[in-house]
Image: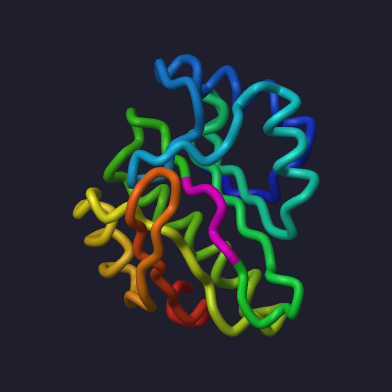
Amino acid sequence: MDVRAARPDDAEDLRTAVSRAREQTVFDDIGAPLLDVSAAGVREAAAEAEWSFLMEHDAEGPVGLAIAHPDPDGAEAELLALWVHPNRAGEGVADELLARVGNALAARGVETLRATVPADRPSAEEFFSAHGFTTRGTHRSPAGDESIVVADPHALT
């Protein structure tokens, strides 16, 4: 499998992969919808994000996606999407994509990667904790309570 920078023209391949996984949207490990997988939605997300990586298999096409975008001041970035095809869960795809994001952020001097985790998803808390994220705090969103978790990008590599 190969990890490379995602491009806006990957939209249709990613949409097809997500559809074959019988999902309607790109979900991260916590089950929260993060990205509209219509061709236009993926194209827009890949074009707007500073860092987007796609992992693909020669025969299967896309098997994972990570998207992060910096805050205006450049000191922090937000992990907008981390999706792994269900058939590839547990194979290190999320680890590799997160490491690639960490390397890119560290190279640009970003000090913190932030992610949002719904309070009712303990498996997501475990995932992020296992990857060096710590809880910064919580906030209420229309979807319910969410934890804000942060990590040093250098620790993700």
Magenta span main SS: strand
Examine the image and state in which quarter residue 126 appears: bottom left
What's the residue at 33%, 64% (across, down)? Answer: 128
Residue 99 placed where, x, y %? 49, 65
Residue 96 placed where, x, y %? 46, 57
Q: Is residue 112 magenta?
A: no
The residues colored magenta run 78-82
Residue 23 placed where, x, y %? 43, 21
What's the residue at 40%, 16% (across, down)? Answer: 22
What's the residue at 69%, 58% (across, down)? Answer: 51
Left or right of 133? Residue 107 is: right
Q: Considering only vertical position in the picture, is 71 above or below 10?
A: below
Instruction: Give the tally of numbered discs.
Output: 0
- The residue lying toward the viewer, choosing from 105 and 123, is 123
Q: How is the image coloured?
A: rainbow
What's the residue at 31%, 39% (across, down)? Answer: 89
- The residue lying toward the viewer, choosing from 111 and 17, is 111
Q: Considering only vertical position in the picture, is 14 above or below 126?
A: above
Examine the image and state in which quarter residue 42 appears: top right
- The residue lying toward the viewer, choosing from 134 and 51, is 134
Residue 138 placed where, x, y %? 36, 68
Left or right of 147? Residue 113 is: right
Q: Is residue 80 magenta?
A: yes
Left or right of 111? Residue 9 is: right
